[in-house]
Each structure stands twice: as C-alpha cells, then as structure tokens.
Amino acid sequence: TWQVRTTRGWMNLIAPFARATFIRNHERVMGHGAAGLARLLGAPRMSQETLDLPGPPPVPIGDGQLLAAGIGAGVAATLAQFACWWVAGMPLAETLVRDARMTAALVLGSGILGQTMPPAGMVLLVATPIHFILSLAYAWIPARFFTRLGSGPAVLAGAAYGLALYGINMYGLTSCFPWFAVARDWPTVVAHVVFGMTVVGGCQSRGN
C-alpha cells in the first residue's frame, strides 16, 4: 500500500479544498508513467481490472489530516459567512463582533453580552480559538464515519452534516446558551453547509 501525502506547506493549507484535484492529478501522472514504462519494456500495460486485483483499502486519516480538515473547514465557513453577510447587506464589522461576543460568552459568561462591552480585540482573541476548537471537535465524526465516500456522496453527506450541525447549534444548544438564537438566519445556514461539505471532503481517505 502506497500512502501519498502532501509535504509542501501551501499544499497542506489548501488540501481540505483541493484534495480531489490532487488525487486526480496524481492518478494522471502515475498513468502516464505506467504507459511510458510499458512502451519501454515493449509489454502491454496491465490495468488493475485486467489483473483482477482487489483495490487498495482506504487509509485511515491521520491526526495531521484531521487537524487540516477541521481548521480548513472552520476557515471556509467563516469566509462563506462573510460573503453571505455582504450579500445580505449586513454590517460586516458589527456582525462579526456580535457573533464573536456570543462565542466568547461560552467561556467568559453571558455578562459580556450586556451594555458594557469588552474591547473587540479581546473578544476576538477569546472567540477565535473557541471557534477552531469546535471545528476540530465537529471534524471527529466525518473522520470516523465518512472517509469511504465518493466525491458526489461526500458532497451530499457534507451538506447534510452541516445542516445537522446547524440544528444542533442553533436549536439544541440554545436551550443552554439562548443568546445564539439571534444568529438563526440564512448566512449561518450557508456557513454550516459549507463547513460540512469542506470537513467531509477533507476527511476523505483513499489508499494509493
């Protein structure tokens, strides 16, 4: 079993989004290599189907891939939400601070949601790690159960997973943290769907 991993920093950064492209490019390069070797040896190229060999087993994803999938999905969801806020005509800075205050309140308490607001910089400093810790936690389920899906099913499963997370976050957790109810809007739905599709795509594991 040949386990192919990206090693360049820029590849690792975009791997959660470009994994399928990397795989197709690798398969194309290896196909050209096999054809060239067959010509050099004067022998027919034997495909896996011709040899009737079983396909390689899926490779369980490692901690590095899980980390990249979770953080990448968190970044993608944030960018998608920014774009949706812009389309909806919502003030970007004010809405960002609002959501950051609600997230920071998970640690600092609901008192920061009152009239006396802490500095925006401190709120963002607290909210950002919480956001990515939750992203990593939500990546655990796709990493365990969604690693063998094809590209099409992975997209659908990711969208469904994102919608499920939206229901959990915006309707389940609001029983304990009611202030999140204000974020029940379509930009938040889109952000959750983008998160789900990105994290499931980033958790796909294939043997090579």
Image (tube, rainbow, N blue to C red):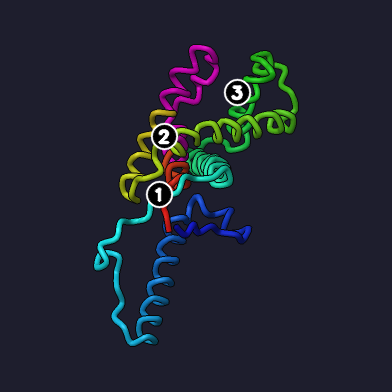
Foreground disc of the pair 1, 2: 1
Q: Secondary structure at mark 2?
A: helix
Q: How far apart are the two marked residues, 1 and 2, measured between alpha carbons? A: 24 Å
Closest to the observer, 98 or 7: 7
Instruction: Judge whether residue 183 can be spotted in this image.
Output: yes
Q: Which residue is mark 1?
A: 58
Q: Quadrant of residue 74?
A: top right
As drawn, the label of residue 102 is: 3
- Image coordinates of residue 61 in percent, x first then y, are 49, 45
| Residue 1 is one of the magenta-drawn residues | no
Q: Is residue 9 left or right of residue 51?
A: right
Sequence-first tag of 3 and 2: 3
**What residue sits right under mark 2 in the picture?**
162
* Measured Cα–Cα span from mark 3 to mark 2: 20 Å
x then y, percent, for residue 167: 41, 24
Please state the extent of the stretch shown in magenta in the rendering. Answer: 166-195
Amino acid type at image mark 2: Gly
